[in-house]
Amino acid sequence: MTNKRIITLTLVAITLALAGSVLIQLQWVRGILDLRKAQMEQSIDDALVDVSERLDRMEALRRIRQHEWGSLLLDEGEAVPERDEAAFSAPGESPALEQRTVEEELRERLVGDMVRGILGAGAPRDPQELIDPHLLDSLLSEELQGHGILADHQFGVLDEEGDLLLIWPPAADADRLKESTHRTRLFRADPLAALLWLHVVVPDQHVHVRRSMWGMLALSLFFTLLIIIAFAYTIRTILWQKRISDIRTDLVNNLTHELKTPISTIALAAEALNDPGMTRTPEQDRAFLGMIRDETKRLGMLVEKVLQSAVLDSGSMVIKPVDIDLHALLDDVVRHGHIQAERRQGAVVLQPGAELFHVQGDRIHLTNVFSNLIDNALKYCDREPRVNVITSSDHRGVTIRVTDNGIGIARAEQERIFERLYRVPTGNVHNVKGFGLGLSYVKAVVERHHGQIHVESEPGRGSTFIIELPFEHGAQG
């Protein structure tokens, strides 16, 4: 099984596992919400029953107090009379037992007469007289809070035909109250009472349920997002590592080819110079020596790029700032670049326009930076190369523009050209050699000098690399 197929199967498995985990989490949250909603509805119904029972007790107590015997009986129960202790301890007698028997008979007779009197008191009272909206609102608030419901409520009292006799608060939704499933009958213990129903609505019921679960929902959402982020990072890392692996393979193949060419050329030139049987002219000897010099320089550049890559990988780049005459440094770099451009009937020109051109920086690294930019400008050009190096300055630092007339860079590629091992597709320019290391090194050096680099380019119209270096020196490590 190929590595590509293994990676694909791994990504599919992780995706399915994450999707399943998220679905299970959502189902679990939905189930908890439904359970909390059912619990809240049951709590509202329980609170209504408790309110109804309290109203029954209060109404019964009121009727008892209105009856003359009931009032006497309640007064007797509230104030227990003091008894003579002698009445309970006379020798030879049991007055306490006799007294309790008389009291029990009297109490039973009074209670029986009282109940019969209350039940035969006459016609039932007007429902409007039975219900005090403020009292009912207070009882509802107390019972709802006792069942853990702190949300606002509305209530209404309906008669047997379903008409509203009372609504509280007055601005409450009457239609919603009539349709509410949270209801209970009032004054069930009074057989003479009219058939009345208490309906209750908690407008923010769902909000209250969600609010009660906010902590749990927040944690669930946090862990779900954490899993998704970790999953995305894992996929990105896997794909990035695969891309790096592919690029490194291409790099090794390309590097091998690049090294073989100058080595073979040097070997052939050296063999020709060392062959005593071969007739040569002084011009031919100089040509062979020039080939050896050029290919040796090419090998040195290849090794330098690999070393630059190694420095970036290890993070061991050290900046040793010294005072640098930037115009003098650029003049040396441009002169070497101009020699290469002349071979293609081109030119590299320095236009020193900066009034202040001394900066603190590392001479070797800055030389490599501008050499890389000019070398790229010459390589990625399908005509006679024209490269201009222009400087300017202000109170903050020096700006260097390296402008060419090359093939240009598409806008979609401009953000990626500074990535390591990334090479821009060259279209019809098939002879461009490189490893995608130069610009990443350039960016790293410029940033170590506290500077900035960006590119302006259009396909077919060339490119301009703009480097801004501050007058202050860069970091030393």
Image (tube, grey):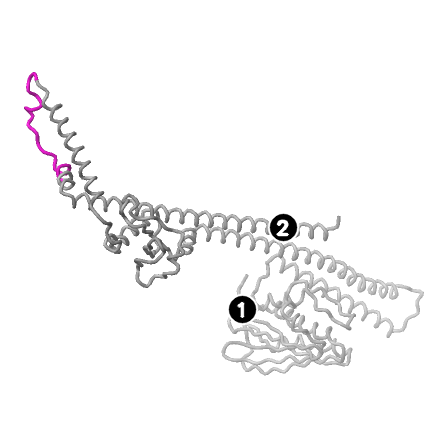
> Which residue is painted at 23% across and 49% down in the image?
123
Query: Which of marks 2 and 1 precedes in the sequence?
Result: 2
Q: How many neighbours does mark 1 have within 10 angstroms: few (below 14), some (14-19), or many (20 or more)?
A: some
Residue 62: mark: none
Decide which of 57, 361 is in the foreground and name it: 57
Question: Is residue 236 depicted above or below 434 in this figure?
Answer: above
Tell me, yes or no, whether the highlighted magenta stretch contains residue 82: yes
The residue that disc 1 covers is: 450
> Which residue is painted at 53% across and 63% down in the image?
476
Amino acid type, residue under disc 2 in the picture: Leu
In front: label 1 or label 2: 2
Dot 2: what SS?
helix
The residue that disc 2 covers is: 16
Q: Residue 248, percent across and down?
A: 71, 58
Please say whether residue 54 is visible from this viewpoint: no
Q: Which residues are magenta?
A: 75-92
Tell me, yes or no, whether the highlighted magenta stretch contains residue 90: yes
